[in-house]
Image: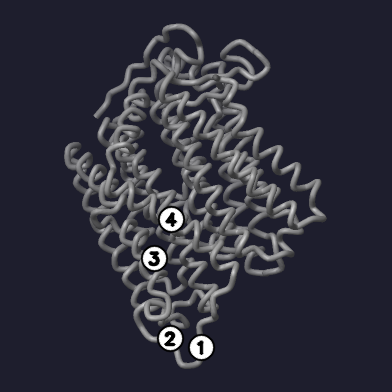
Amino acid sequence: MSHLLVLPVLVPLVTAVTMLLAWRSRRVQRVGSLLGAVALLGTTLWIAAAVWNDGVQHLQVGNWPSPFGITLVADVLAAAMLVIVGVTGACVLVYALGSIDAEREGNGFHALYHLLLMGVCGAFLAGDLFNLYVWFEVLLITSFVLLVLGNDRSQVKGAVSYVLLNLVASLTFLAGVALLYGIAGSLNLADLAVRLPEVDAPGLITTVSMLFLVAFGIKAAVFPLFFWLPAAYHTPPVAVTAIFAGLLTKVGVYALIRVFTLLFTQDVGYTHTILLGVAALTMITGVLGAVTQTDVRKILSFHIVSQIGYMVMGLALFTPLALLGAIFYILHHIIVKTNLFLVGGVAHRLAGDFELKNLGGLYRAKPWLAVLFLIPALSLAGLPPLSGFWAKLVILQAGLEAEAYFAVAAALGAGLLTLVSMTKIWNEAFWKPLPDDRSLSPGTPSLAAMVTPVVLLAAVTLSIGLYAEPLVVLAERSAAELLDTTSYVQAVLGEPPTPPTAEVR
């Protein structure tokens, strides 16, 4: 079953190549792109079932012995992230079929979209640091082209800040990789987990860990490295922004979780305390930025930053309950944030604007859209019985148990201000009358393609909120694997490892 691990990379790659070959036919591209997204979803579900039933799956590409060569690994966390890529990738693509213009489709949107999904899947499966770096570069290149695809000057302006800071992240990551190889003589994650505790230079390892914190922190958009995100995410079409919002920053969070549970656990009292401070500041600065904005996309972009803080807080606390909460939060947030951008796109299609002052009357004209907005909006704010309530509850409980009261206070304050900003969108876009000089456009056949994924994602949010136990069980098992890395290391190296010593708070 381990050979399944190549499929999340192979399926989008083949789809992208096929889209390039069929660039003259828009119809073939649309049908082929949709089939490729559905196939990716099917393969991720297949892998998740194999991991759940048979444990950690591992593949050495080219039959190189571990720890040499390209290593692909899927534990419960990686498998869950792959499934969420499949779900959001398929939903956003359906939305794009109703919203992306013919010019962008003719200029390679579908090929780029699937290359982006390939990069995300590759990052989640990477079992060594160098190939994780390679997948990050695939993500950077494809996301940059998707950002500038079109004729809008604002897209180019936003993309410049996006690519420059992410290039800094890549260089920092590469420097950390080089230093780590010099220290331990390996880049395989499982092999490093065995070797690093034996290195008699704990201060040097902690220093290297800070390089990884900066590199992955930029990718995840944590404080104070997040300013590239709100400068760029409001410029491309909504379908592009939605897939970026759902997945790209989560690759950075996933990488932080992977290295700060598997590799850098020698000085938890220092490294994870820094992570906790970063998490609290990320929550507060992100939500304060959201409250001051008047453009729907900018409000939602700043909320990406704020919500990342909750996930990093779960990692920083480094307890079973906290890691459970972090994983639950990631999976919930990908669905909710993607859906909020899609709802914003539907509102834009009807009202023709993203500025709150130019919106209004949507509740009276389209009450179904108001309901579809309230579900992810209230979930983002953490109101029961939606998925965000359970995610925040677990994180807060873990914070109280760890006596991290300042982080808990930051989380509560961010949650309250999130509700304030969601209320602002509701009052301006849905509740107040439409300005006299504006009118709502009638529904079009393409609107059905845009609304369908919104309904599906809203249903997922409701399902998680009303029946959270399956996701809690999954997150609990994943947290246990992260805290006890024996199964991960043994699956890759094929021998009982020497477990690293770690002070778990």
C-beta proximity under 8 Å, tags 1 and 2: yes
Asked whether disc 1 touches disc 4, contact meaning CB atoms under 8 Å apart, the reply is: no
Which residue lies under the disc numbered 2? 434
Can you tell which of label 4 and label 3 is closer to the viewer? Answer: 3
Q: Disc 1 marks which residue?
A: 438
- Classify 10 Å Cα crowding around label 2: few (below 14), some (14-19), many (20 and above): many
Q: Disc 2 on helix, strand or loop?
A: loop
Q: Residue shown at 69%/38% (left/top)?
A: 13
Q: Quadrant of the C terminus?
A: top left
For badge 4, the amino acid type reads Lys
Q: Earlier in the sequence, mark 1 or mark 4?
A: 4
Residue 316 seen in the figure: no
Which amino acid does the dot numbered 2 rest on?
Leu
**Is disc 1 surrounded by few (<14), some (14 to 19) or many (20+) residues within 10 Å?**
few
Residue named by callout 3: 373
Mark before the other along the chain sequence, 1 or 3? 3
Can you tell which of label 2 and label 4 is closer to the viewer? Answer: 2
Q: Quadrant of residue 237?
A: bottom right
For residue 392, side relative to residue 245 (left or right)? left
Q: Which mark is residue 195?
A: none
Q: Are marks 2 and 3 in contact (CB under 8 Å)?
A: no
Q: CA distance from mark 1 to mark 2?
A: 7 Å
Front one among 464 and 181: 464
- The quadrant of the image that shows the N terminus is top right
Q: Residue furthest bottom?
A: 436
Q: Are marks 4 and 3 in contact (CB under 8 Å)?
A: no
| Residue denoted by label 4 | 337
Q: Amino acid at mark 3?
A: Phe
